[in-house]
Amino acid sequence: MNITKHTLGAAALTLTLTIGGASVALAGDNEGGADREAKIAQICADPDAAIAKLTERQTKVSERIAKLTELRTKATEAGRTKLVTKIERRLDRLQTALDRIAIRIDKAPTWIAENCS
């Protein structure tokens, strides 16, 4: 009985990995030129919406940083050092993302002027 369960589990895992690998391989075949042109056209069609989307993303990341900071304080008070380490790693990643978003927002008007004329 256990052998059957393990065999079925291994077969399911193998199938999942095979399908996943094929998906990645097929996705990698696209050169991305058409996608880039489509994105540029979309941004140029409504540049205010693109900046609004970046601003919305910045707000969500800032809110998440605030929430994780509260959780880190609670975890520190509870003495949960492993959890504090995980939260700090996540906070570092989110801060990096927030910095990148801020840079994109600052560069957006210049980029739009150069590419949407």
Image (cartoon, grey):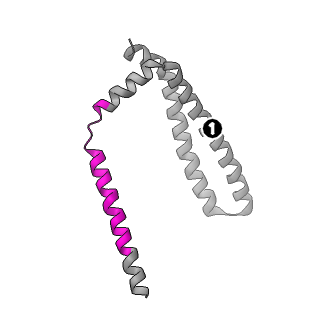
Q: Indicate the amino acid at tag 1.
A: Ser
Residue visible at 53% across and 34% down in the picture: 99
Residue found at the very far top of the displayed protein = 117
- In the picture shown, does residue 14 fall above or below 49? below
Kindly indicate the quadrant of the structure image that contains residue 78: bottom right
Position above or below: 34 against 107: below
Which residue is drawn at the image coordinates 49% and 34% (left, top)? Answer: 100
Q: Considering depth in this image, is 53 or 4 the residue closer to the camera?
A: 4
Q: Where residue 67 appears, x then y in whole percent?
A: 68, 46
Residue 15 lies within the magenta run: yes
Q: In what element is the residue under mark 1?
A: helix
Task: Write the start and end of the magenta stretch as one range.
Answer: 10-34
Q: Residue 41: x and y, percent?
A: 38, 22
- Residue, x 39% and y 83% (percent of image)? 4
Is 14 left, or right, of 68 in this rendering? left
Q: Is residue 101 magenta?
A: no
Q: Quadrant of the N terminus?
A: bottom left
Q: State the residue at coordinates (55%, 52%).
A: 89
